[in-house]
Amino acid sequence: RKEVEQDPGPFNVPEGATVAFNCTYSNSASQSFFWYRQDCRKEPKLLMSVYSSGNEDGRFTAQLNRASQYISLLIRDSKLSDSATYLCVVKGFQKLVFGTGTRLLVSP
Amino acid sequence: EAGVAQSPRYKIIEKRQSVAFWCNPISGHATLYWYQQILGQGPKLLIQFQNNGVVDDSQLPKDRFSAERLKGVDSTLKIQPAKLEDSAVYLCASSVTGLNQPQHFGDGTRLSIL
């Protein structure tokens, strides 16, 4: 089993739609969680950290479920510019593991 | 604030040749990471430094890859000799030390092996 698993997609959604991605992790001792965004041929960029109580940043909401060992990212009112690959990142003791990413395509 | 600097941006070499990449992290970031990202996959950690010491190099193919961060600031990653499967983007990232500190990535070096 991979340490961090994501559905590779692609998720094809129309503008304005709400879309959600899940990510599961295998190490129950994992301590920090992040979502990164990666545009084609660009470096990953931090989208948001994920906190136990859940957190929101504009149209983006991240949730953590430690009991089931998954994190989620919800994007509301999708924009064309949201088209990218979304990487789930899990950090254990000094070790950070990336998922393979979920590709999102938002169409007009 | 200046970001993570990497060079070169692109490199094309033939198999069995050697190549080196350079990274200068964000000023004050004690932790430095080298990742390999193959097309269609997430970044894979090759090596992590805390200042000039190695924290994790468990996934570094040590028969051909080496990395150093002698003065605890900039770092070089070397491949010698290169194989076809080394074609990838090599990303450098840095972070402040701490549990919830995110990493900041450089633009990466795109390596093509012919």
Image: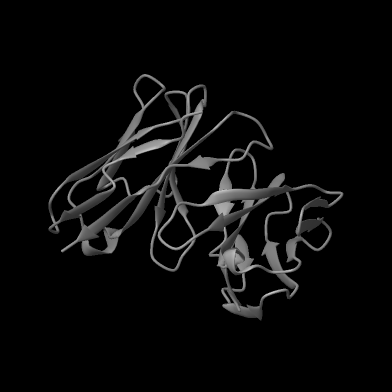
**Residue A4 location, quadrant:** bottom right
- Residue drawn where x is 15% and y is 64% of the image: B114
Residue A42: where, in percent of width, then height? 43, 55
- The residue at the far front in this view is A108
How many marks can you see?
A: 0
Q: Is residue B84 above or below residue B58?
A: below
Residue B105 shown left or right of residue A68 in the figure: left
Can residue B50 be seen at all in this image of the molecule? yes
Residue A79 appears in which quarter of the rendering?
Answer: bottom right
Vertically, is A5 above or below B24? below
Seen in the picture, residue A82 relative to B28 is either above or below; the reply is below
Q: Is residue B114 left or right of residue A75?
A: left
The residue at 58%/64% (across/down) is A81
Q: How does the figure colour the protein chain or chains?
A: one colour
Residue at position x 43%, y 35% from top? Answer: B4
Residue depicted at x 35% and y 55%? B89
Q: Residue furthest top?
A: B71
Residue A26, given in percent of the width and then of the height, sits at 67, 60
Relative depth, front residue between B15 and B22: B22
